[in-house]
Amino acid sequence: MSLLAVDDTVAGYGAAENILKGASLRVAPGEIVTIIGPNGAGKSTLLKAVAGLVPLKSGRITLGDTVLTNLDPMSRARAGIAFVPQERNVFGALSVGENLSISSFLAPAEEGARVTEIYERYPMLNSKRKALARTLSGGQRQILAMAMGLMAGPSLILLDEPTAGLSPKAAEELFDAIVSLNRGGLPILMVEQHAIEALDISHRGYVLVSGKVAAEGAGQDLARDPEIRRLFLGG
Protein backbone atom coordinates (compact mmCIF):
# COMPACT_ATOMS: atom_id res chain seq x y z
CA MET A 1 0.00 0.00 0.00
CA SER A 2 1.41 3.39 -1.03
CA LEU A 3 0.88 6.70 0.70
CA LEU A 4 2.63 8.62 -2.09
CA ALA A 5 2.65 7.34 -5.66
CA VAL A 6 4.69 9.14 -8.33
CA ASP A 7 4.16 7.64 -11.79
CA ASP A 8 6.08 8.34 -15.02
CA THR A 9 6.72 11.99 -14.21
CA VAL A 10 8.14 14.22 -16.93
CA ALA A 11 9.03 17.77 -15.90
CA GLY A 12 11.45 20.62 -16.53
CA TYR A 13 11.80 24.34 -16.18
CA GLY A 14 9.99 26.29 -18.87
CA ALA A 15 10.72 25.20 -22.41
CA ALA A 16 14.11 23.79 -21.48
CA GLU A 17 15.00 20.14 -21.80
CA ASN A 18 13.09 17.88 -19.45
CA ILE A 19 14.92 17.13 -16.21
CA LEU A 20 12.58 14.33 -15.12
CA LYS A 21 12.15 11.78 -17.88
CA GLY A 22 9.62 9.29 -16.58
CA ALA A 23 10.62 9.02 -12.93
CA SER A 24 8.43 6.93 -10.62
CA LEU A 25 8.59 6.14 -6.90
CA ARG A 26 6.52 5.06 -3.93
CA VAL A 27 6.44 5.96 -0.23
CA ALA A 28 4.49 3.65 2.06
CA PRO A 29 3.01 4.70 5.40
CA GLY A 30 5.71 4.93 8.05
CA GLU A 31 8.66 4.84 5.66
CA ILE A 32 11.79 6.91 5.26
CA VAL A 33 12.64 6.91 1.55
CA THR A 34 15.81 8.56 0.24
CA ILE A 35 16.59 9.63 -3.33
CA ILE A 36 20.28 9.61 -4.26
CA GLY A 37 22.21 10.06 -7.49
CA PRO A 38 24.78 12.24 -9.25
CA ASN A 39 24.52 16.02 -9.52
CA GLY A 40 21.99 17.08 -12.11
CA ALA A 41 20.05 13.82 -11.94
CA GLY A 42 16.81 15.59 -11.05
CA LYS A 43 16.60 14.67 -7.37
CA SER A 44 15.51 18.07 -6.05
CA THR A 45 13.33 18.60 -9.11
CA LEU A 46 11.46 15.42 -8.25
CA LEU A 47 10.80 16.65 -4.70
CA LYS A 48 9.65 20.02 -6.05
CA ALA A 49 7.37 18.26 -8.52
CA VAL A 50 5.72 16.42 -5.63
CA ALA A 51 5.34 19.72 -3.75
CA GLY A 52 3.86 21.41 -6.84
CA LEU A 53 6.73 23.85 -7.34
CA VAL A 54 7.64 22.34 -10.71
CA PRO A 55 4.67 21.54 -12.98
CA LEU A 56 4.47 18.17 -14.68
CA LYS A 57 4.41 17.87 -18.44
CA SER A 58 3.08 14.35 -18.03
CA GLY A 59 2.68 11.74 -15.34
CA ARG A 60 0.62 11.43 -12.18
CA ILE A 61 1.15 12.06 -8.46
CA THR A 62 -1.24 10.88 -5.76
CA LEU A 63 -1.22 11.13 -1.98
CA GLY A 64 -3.55 8.51 -0.57
CA ASP A 65 -6.81 8.96 -2.44
CA THR A 66 -6.00 12.53 -3.51
CA VAL A 67 -4.70 13.20 -7.02
CA LEU A 68 -2.09 15.96 -6.65
CA THR A 69 -1.06 16.23 -10.29
CA ASN A 70 -2.89 19.45 -11.15
CA LEU A 71 -3.08 20.99 -7.68
CA ASP A 72 -1.16 24.16 -6.79
CA PRO A 73 1.40 24.11 -3.92
CA MET A 74 -1.05 25.49 -1.36
CA SER A 75 -3.63 22.84 -2.20
CA ARG A 76 -0.97 20.15 -1.89
CA ALA A 77 -0.01 21.53 1.51
CA ARG A 78 -3.65 21.32 2.57
CA ALA A 79 -3.72 17.73 1.27
CA GLY A 80 -0.86 16.83 3.63
CA ILE A 81 2.44 17.65 1.88
CA ALA A 82 5.09 19.61 3.80
CA PHE A 83 8.18 20.68 1.84
CA VAL A 84 11.39 21.80 3.58
CA PRO A 85 13.73 23.36 1.00
CA GLN A 86 17.49 23.20 1.18
CA GLU A 87 18.02 26.97 1.41
CA ARG A 88 16.09 29.97 2.69
CA ASN A 89 13.93 27.70 4.80
CA VAL A 90 13.55 29.97 7.85
CA PHE A 91 12.87 33.69 8.32
CA GLY A 92 16.12 34.97 9.79
CA ALA A 93 14.75 38.31 11.00
CA LEU A 94 11.97 36.61 13.00
CA SER A 95 12.28 34.77 16.29
CA VAL A 96 12.00 31.01 16.58
CA GLY A 97 8.54 31.42 18.07
CA GLU A 98 7.44 33.75 15.28
CA ASN A 99 8.70 31.31 12.65
CA LEU A 100 6.55 28.60 14.18
CA SER A 101 3.56 30.89 14.54
CA ILE A 102 3.46 31.98 10.90
CA SER A 103 3.81 28.34 9.85
CA SER A 104 0.43 27.52 11.41
CA PHE A 105 -1.53 29.32 8.68
CA LEU A 106 -3.19 26.12 7.47
CA ALA A 107 -4.56 25.31 10.91
CA PRO A 108 -4.48 28.42 13.13
CA ALA A 109 -6.76 26.84 15.71
CA GLU A 110 -4.12 24.14 16.28
CA GLU A 111 -1.22 26.56 16.71
CA GLY A 112 -0.99 26.42 20.51
CA ALA A 113 -1.13 22.64 20.75
CA ARG A 114 1.36 22.13 17.94
CA VAL A 115 3.84 24.68 19.28
CA THR A 116 3.67 22.96 22.68
CA GLU A 117 4.27 19.59 21.04
CA ILE A 118 7.23 20.93 19.05
CA TYR A 119 8.82 22.52 22.12
CA GLU A 120 8.48 19.18 23.93
CA ARG A 121 10.02 17.35 20.97
CA TYR A 122 12.81 19.91 20.47
CA PRO A 123 13.77 21.50 23.83
CA MET A 124 16.46 23.52 22.06
CA LEU A 125 13.77 25.45 20.17
CA ASN A 126 11.94 26.11 23.41
CA SER A 127 15.08 27.49 25.04
CA LYS A 128 15.68 29.73 22.02
CA ARG A 129 12.07 30.64 21.25
CA LYS A 130 12.79 34.38 21.54
CA ALA A 131 16.09 34.24 19.62
CA LEU A 132 16.20 35.43 16.02
CA ALA A 133 16.41 32.51 13.61
CA ARG A 134 19.52 33.98 11.98
CA THR A 135 21.43 33.53 15.25
CA LEU A 136 20.92 29.75 15.28
CA SER A 137 23.61 27.32 14.18
CA GLY A 138 23.17 25.50 10.88
CA GLY A 139 21.87 22.36 12.56
CA GLN A 140 19.51 24.34 14.77
CA ARG A 141 18.12 26.16 11.73
CA GLN A 142 17.42 22.83 10.04
CA ILE A 143 15.57 21.61 13.13
CA LEU A 144 13.53 24.82 13.07
CA ALA A 145 12.80 24.38 9.35
CA MET A 146 11.52 20.84 9.97
CA ALA A 147 9.47 22.06 12.92
CA MET A 148 7.90 24.73 10.72
CA GLY A 149 6.85 21.98 8.33
CA LEU A 150 5.31 20.05 11.22
CA MET A 151 3.11 23.01 12.15
CA ALA A 152 0.80 22.10 9.26
CA GLY A 153 0.22 18.60 10.64
CA PRO A 154 1.42 16.91 7.42
CA SER A 155 0.92 13.31 6.42
CA LEU A 156 4.25 13.37 4.49
CA ILE A 157 7.28 15.62 4.84
CA LEU A 158 9.76 16.27 2.00
CA LEU A 159 13.33 17.15 2.99
CA ASP A 160 15.67 18.57 0.33
CA GLU A 161 19.29 17.89 1.36
CA PRO A 162 18.70 18.62 5.05
CA THR A 163 22.37 18.16 6.07
CA ALA A 164 23.84 20.40 3.34
CA GLY A 165 26.59 22.57 4.80
CA LEU A 166 26.47 21.01 8.26
CA SER A 167 29.44 19.72 10.20
CA PRO A 168 29.69 15.92 10.57
CA LYS A 169 28.50 16.15 14.18
CA ALA A 170 25.55 18.40 13.30
CA ALA A 171 24.65 16.13 10.37
CA GLU A 172 24.67 13.08 12.65
CA GLU A 173 22.41 14.87 15.14
CA LEU A 174 20.03 15.87 12.37
CA PHE A 175 19.84 12.27 11.09
CA ASP A 176 18.97 11.24 14.65
CA ALA A 177 16.20 13.86 14.67
CA ILE A 178 14.87 12.55 11.34
CA VAL A 179 14.78 8.97 12.65
CA SER A 180 13.02 10.11 15.82
CA LEU A 181 10.45 12.03 13.80
CA ASN A 182 9.78 8.98 11.64
CA ARG A 183 9.45 6.71 14.67
CA GLY A 184 6.62 9.01 15.73
CA GLY A 185 4.77 7.85 12.63
CA LEU A 186 5.54 10.51 10.01
CA PRO A 187 6.64 9.24 6.56
CA ILE A 188 9.64 11.09 5.09
CA LEU A 189 10.87 11.46 1.51
CA MET A 190 14.26 13.10 1.26
CA VAL A 191 17.09 13.96 -1.07
CA GLU A 192 20.43 13.78 0.70
CA GLN A 193 24.06 14.41 -0.23
CA HIS A 194 25.39 12.15 2.55
CA ALA A 195 24.06 9.17 0.64
CA ILE A 196 25.48 6.29 2.67
CA GLU A 197 24.38 7.74 6.00
CA ALA A 198 20.93 8.57 4.60
CA LEU A 199 20.42 5.12 3.11
CA ASP A 200 21.45 3.52 6.40
CA ILE A 201 18.47 5.15 8.16
CA SER A 202 16.06 4.64 5.25
CA HIS A 203 13.60 1.84 4.73
CA ARG A 204 14.05 2.14 0.96
CA GLY A 205 16.01 4.18 -1.54
CA TYR A 206 15.98 5.19 -5.19
CA VAL A 207 18.96 6.00 -7.41
CA LEU A 208 18.06 8.68 -9.92
CA VAL A 209 20.20 9.10 -13.04
CA SER A 210 19.44 11.53 -15.88
CA GLY A 211 15.87 11.98 -14.72
CA LYS A 212 15.05 8.27 -14.48
CA VAL A 213 15.16 5.71 -11.69
CA ALA A 214 18.23 3.52 -12.29
CA ALA A 215 17.91 1.37 -9.18
CA GLU A 216 15.74 0.94 -6.12
CA GLY A 217 15.74 -1.26 -3.05
CA ALA A 218 16.09 -1.48 0.70
CA GLY A 219 18.16 1.43 1.97
CA GLN A 220 20.92 -0.59 3.59
CA ASP A 221 21.11 -2.94 0.61
CA LEU A 222 21.73 0.00 -1.71
CA ALA A 223 24.30 1.46 0.68
CA ARG A 224 26.28 -1.78 0.58
CA ASP A 225 25.93 -2.59 -3.11
CA PRO A 226 29.47 -2.36 -4.57
CA GLU A 227 28.29 -1.10 -7.96
CA ILE A 228 26.05 1.55 -6.43
CA ARG A 229 28.89 2.68 -4.18
CA ARG A 230 31.35 2.81 -7.07
CA LEU A 231 29.09 4.74 -9.41
CA PHE A 232 27.23 7.06 -7.10
CA LEU A 233 28.62 7.04 -3.57
CA GLY A 234 32.31 7.58 -4.13
CA GLY A 235 33.67 4.05 -3.82
Image: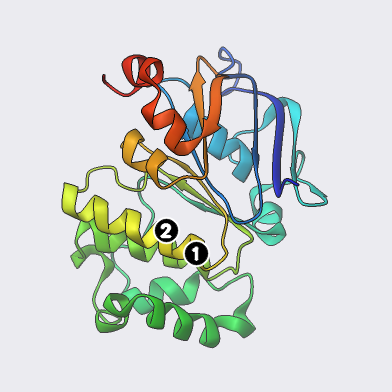
Residue at 56%, 14% (x, y): give it: 16
The foreground one among 53 and 28 is 28
Q: Amino acid at mark 2?
A: Val
Of the residues shown, which amino acid type is indicated by label 1? Arg
In the image, residue 81 lies at what x, y percent? 62, 54
> Mark 2: few, some, or many residues within 10 Å (few <14, many ≥20)?
some
Q: Where residue 88 sits: x, y (%)? A: 36, 50
Q: Which residue is mark 2?
A: 179
Give the crowd class for mark 1: few <14, some 14-19, many >=20 residues within 10 Å. few
Q: CA distance from mark 1 to mark 2?
A: 6 Å
The quarter of the displayed image where residue 4 is located: top right
* Tag 1 residue: 183
Residue drawn at (38%, 81%) of the image? 119
Tell me if 196 is positioned left or right of 68 in this view.
Answer: left
Task: Answer whether labels 1 and 2 touch (C-beta < 8 Å).
Answer: yes
* Mark 1, secondary structure of its residue: helix
